[in-house]
Image: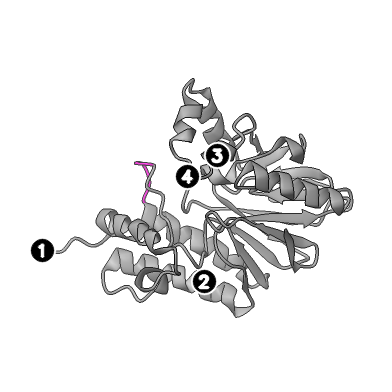
Amino acid sequence: MLTQVAQGVLVHHSELLANNTVVVLGSGGALVVDPGITGTEMACLAADLRELGQPVVAGFATHPDWDHVLWHDDLGDAPRYGTARCAQSMRDLRADPEWRARVAGALPEEAAHDIPMDPFGLITALPAGASTIQWDGPTVRVVEHPAHAVGHAALVVVDSGVLVAGDMLSDVFVPMLDEQRGDNDPVADHLRGLDALGSVAGDVEVVVPGHGSVGRGEGVRRRIEADRAYVHTLRDGGTFDDPRVTSPAPGWEWTTMIHDSQVERFGVVRD
């Protein structure tokens, strides 16, 4: 089911990981951002768009995590964009003869049988230097930053005042630092990513995270500051005063494992 969150911007919510697919309506069709998670849900999304008379004319993947590079044949063969780094990451993955097995190993058991693999990760890089998505629709700015994953980007739907945050600014997950690369500083990179989102926060009234609930008004700034406080506490030490750590939502207690792992890897080591 599609829910309108702002003029011309709709969200399809998946219960599995509280994933949000964002749909931006254009004059000739829709831009679909991070469709997921299951094939059944994506087929439902495609049917809803057909009912609205909105063919999919473009897609966008905010970053190369498995649950953000999904697609379904019912969504059509529109170009699916991402940053150059995101697209390269997917090309590298699919060049591995064992890529399907690698992806399958990361999928949740309850959904693995219903995730289409053929279109997985077929991402086209945005043109070099592009700051917006070129499509027949409202202006959508691309805000690339180094937080969470290589090639991550947020989107700003300018006229609607919506920030599509990817795996940032969630109310169910703590900030998830990039633990995959050995050549970066995940803490500093995440803070730079939050700075990038903060630089556009004054232009938006709605934030749609990749996971969790939609934030509005002052809630946009509060989420940025909550994530910044978490990363500062992780970096500097101290007591975490964050409900995502101290009192996760019912059914989401397992997310504290992410926090515990990050404290072990990035937290302050004291004698």
Of the pair 250 and 158, the residue shown nearer to us: 250
Read off the residue under disc 1: 271
Q: Which mark is residue 221?
A: none
Which residues, given as a range, are shown in magenta?
181-185
> Callout 2, which amino acid?
Arg
Secondary structure under the numbered disc 1 in the rendered image = loop
Task: State whether residue 203 is above or below residue 98.
Answer: below
Earlier in the chain: of badge 1 and badge 3, it is 3
Q: Disc 1 vs disc 4: Cβ atoms closer than 8 Å? A: no
The kind of residue on which mark 3 rests is Arg
Residue annotated with mark 4: 108
Give the side of residue 62 with respect to residue 181, left or right: right
* Magenta span main SS: loop
> Callout 2 environment at 10 Å: few (<14), some (14 to 19), or many (20+)?
some
Q: Which residue is mark 3?
A: 85
Q: Residue at x 41, y 69 (%)?
A: 248
Q: Amino acid at mark 1?
A: Asp
> Measured from the top left, where is residue 143 in percent x and y?
61, 55
- Mark 4 crowdedness (10 Å alpha carbons): few <14, some 14-19, many ≥20: few
Assign a secondary structure to mark 4. Answer: loop
> What is the secondary structure assignment of the residue under circle 2?
helix
For marks 3 and 2 on the same chain, the one whose residue lies earlier in the sequence: 3
Find residue 64 and report its horizontal and vertical position in percent: 54, 42
Which label sits in the foreground, 3 or 4?
4
Say if the magenta span includes residue 45: no
> Which numbered mark, 1 or 4, is in the foreground of this view?
4
Q: Is residue 228 left or right of residue 20?
A: left
Q: Nearer the viewer, mark 3 or mark 2?
A: 2
How far apart, in angstroms, are the residues tagged by discs 1 and 3?
Answer: 39 Å
